[in-house]
Amino acid sequence: MYIPRLYSEERPAELEAFIAAHPLGALVTADASGSFFATHLPLIFEGGVLEGHVARANQHHKLAHSGAEALVIFTGPNAYVTPSWYPEKATHGRVVPTWNYVAVHAYGPVRFIDDPEWLLPHLNRLVDRNEAARLAYAGDTRWRVGDAPKEFIAQQMKAIVGVEIRVTRLEGKWKMSQNRTAEAVEGVVEGLEASPREMDREVSAIVAARRAEARDSLSK
């Protein structure tokens, strides 16, 4: 991924927290002929390992042999940025639109696992992680794998194949107007904050947070 230094995020804690908050990744691998295949799937990241599962009917686990290099792409809030928010528009007009976004790429060898003794603990971890996130607004109404009949879960597991990626490298890109003047950044923050779109307001908060971090680093 092309990452200008201004937009680079290398702190492991930040990258891992982003994956935890945006767990739907795009798993991309190449087959023997060099053709790419992608699957979108929820993943959990623990101890340097990404784990998930794909449908057995999904040919991905047949096209990519175990040990092949994989790329997993995680994306987050993004928003269009109009030059109308830049003060430079009124002074010299040499400004153009752009797009602010966050992306994290994970790389590592992939392994497909067709083993119910691996799959069941994985499903428990995946479900528990995502059900726990509901507690803040739904109360303790969590669903657990054990709530369903064992024979039903066993049957369901026959229809999936596990996926494990041992991550060797993480890249993070927070493109959040860091290349603009302080006045332009303020215009972006205010403009996005005023948007009726929730994601625009999320991006506004990230732009403001990155601006504050930059100020703090300069004052040290």
Image (cartoon, helix red, strand yellow):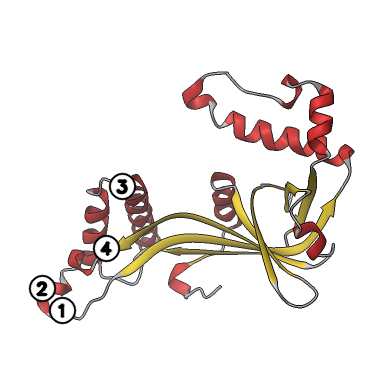
Residue positioned most to the left? 90
Q: Amino acid at mark 4?
A: Val
Pointer 1 with pointer 3, Cβ within 8 A: no
81 w.r.t. 113: above or below? below
Residue displayed at 74% across by 22% down: 148
Which residue matches tag 4?
185
Q: Which mark is residue 93?
A: 1
Splitting the image into 4 quarters, where does residue 81 fall?
bottom left
Mark closer to the chain start, 2 or 4: 2
The mark closer to the camera, 1 or 3, is: 3
Which residue matches tag 3?
197
Residue positioned most to the front? 57
Q: Distance between the Cα atoms at labels 3 and 2? A: 26 Å
Q: Amino acid at mark 1?
A: Gly
Q: Amino acid at mark 3?
A: Arg
Mark closer to the chain start, 1 or 3: 1
| Towards the viewer: 83 or 113 | 113
